Amino acid sequence: MATPNNKRQRVVIVGAGFSGLTFARSLNNTDYEVYLIDRHNYHQFQPLMYQVATARLEPASISFPLRKVFQHTHNVTIRIAEVEELDVEQKVLHTSVGDIAYHRLVLCIGCTTNYFGNERIRANSFPMKSVPNAMALRNRILQTFEDTIEAGPDELQSLLNFVIVGGGPTGVELSGAMAEMKKNILPKDYPEVDFSRLMIYLIEGSPNTLNSMSEASRIKSRKYLEKLGVIVRTGTTVEDYDGTTVTLKTGETLVARNLIWAAGVTGNVLKGMPTSVMVRGNRLKTNRFGEVEGLDGVYAVGDIAYMPTPKYPNGHPQLANVANAQAAHIAGNFKRELKGKQRVEFEYHNKGTMATVGKRKAVVDLPGLSFQGVFAWLTWMFVHLMLLLNVKNRIIVFINWMVSYFANDSTLRLMLKADRGEGTPATVEKRGQPVVKG
């Protein structure tokens, strides 16, 4: 590993999601020595993963190589590694590529799928928290449609039932996308299958879809879904799923080969992190400067951070807007310290929330304003295009959207599965690496 510059403070950032990438970019070409660590060599744009899962976009359209982002920097080092343990006393991070010492550790480790302790659901359902998850789900959806061709009458309906759990933006958007696939694409691809029997169930435990949004958006989103043919069940939860039978809290059962779990998240837990700093949902409690309470030099930013403020006494919502704003602000405090300036407490200014249900169907809540329909859909598209990291990806996504809009079709329905060819090693030994000293 590179010899550290002892004249600089080393800032180690774990996680290259929205908050981690924003933090690293904010410290780009400063006097800090920055290490950015992630298990993947790319940043993934989570809001559009459902379009990868439904074959509307390719994964490269929403993924950005980290080394490309930092090609022209002199102080950011990328390490692709698994974080194995944290030693808060020695200020050392143990990783799969060696030990990395730090002066300041910024945890942007985000959240993972929350199965609420139900191991059978975890083992048999499909999550959608990463690009590999989205690709695995796409392969499964497309393979299911292939299987319907030869399925017997007893098996067919279980293949044609899709159950999506969670009525937040991910569940709503995925349900709408699958409903449009049922209407516009599948009858042309599989003329021998009666897709009027394809049932898309959306299960939500709260009384409404998009329950955190305005009443108008909640009502409209459900109307849009039901108009598309989605069967919406609110006020109930999934109690069990064994791979073929979904059991609801009401006692009702659904036969389905595919259950997609988008019902909640919980913070990723880092081994060595004291449980005393964790609160509900495994989030890390911080002060208004992002410092984890009781831990010297450790910060938490984004979804993993629980930062109570007068405006948000129960912590901030786990949204990309919050993560980006928090990361930019706390990194700004780091830069203020280099100049001998006083730090400023973080305060989030709500920029609104939005979700799309389908073609010309979306809901938008802005501070003091809520609107739905075509203009909301155009707003959603514009905002998400602008959030993509570079112009190339914006153009690719825009072209795919326009083709899909005018043709009611997509040419991306490819099942891409890993195929280890002859001569490929089954395992790759981990190389030992020296300690990176601070």
Image (spheres, rainbow, N blue to C red):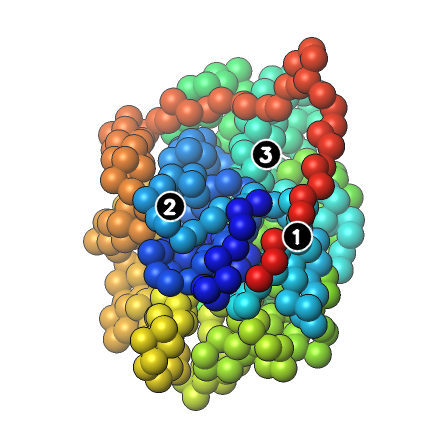
Query: Which residue type does callout 3 highlight?
Result: Ala
**Does dot 3 land on a helix, a strand or a loop?**
helix
**Does dot 1 land on a helix, a strand or a loop?**
loop
- Residue depth check, mark 2 versus mark 3: number of the one nearer the observer: 2
Q: Which residue is mark 3?
A: 136
The correct choice, above or below, for 64 with respect to 353 in the image is: above
Give the quarter of the image for residue 347.
bottom left
Query: Counting residues from the N terminus, which is met first, the one under dot 2 or under dot 1?
Result: 2
How far apart are the alpha carbons under marks 1 and 3?
36 Å
Of residues 202 and 27, the one drawn nearer to the viewer in this rendering = 27
Of residues 284 and 34, the one drawn nearer to the viewer in this rendering = 34
User: At which x and y percent is residue 47?
Assistant: 42, 50
Seen as rendered, the residue at the extreme left is 375
Q: Which residue is mark 1?
A: 435
User: At which x and y percent is residue 283?
Assistant: 60, 70
Q: Which residue is mark 2?
A: 70
Query: Which residue type does callout 2 highlight?
Result: Phe
Seen as rendered, the residue at the extreme bottom is 310
Q: Residues within 10 Å of mark 2 (few under 14, many from 20)?
A: some
Q: Residue at x 40, y 53 (%)?
A: 75
User: At which x and y percent is residue 145?
Assistant: 57, 25
The correct choice, above or below, for 117 with respect to 275 in the image is: above
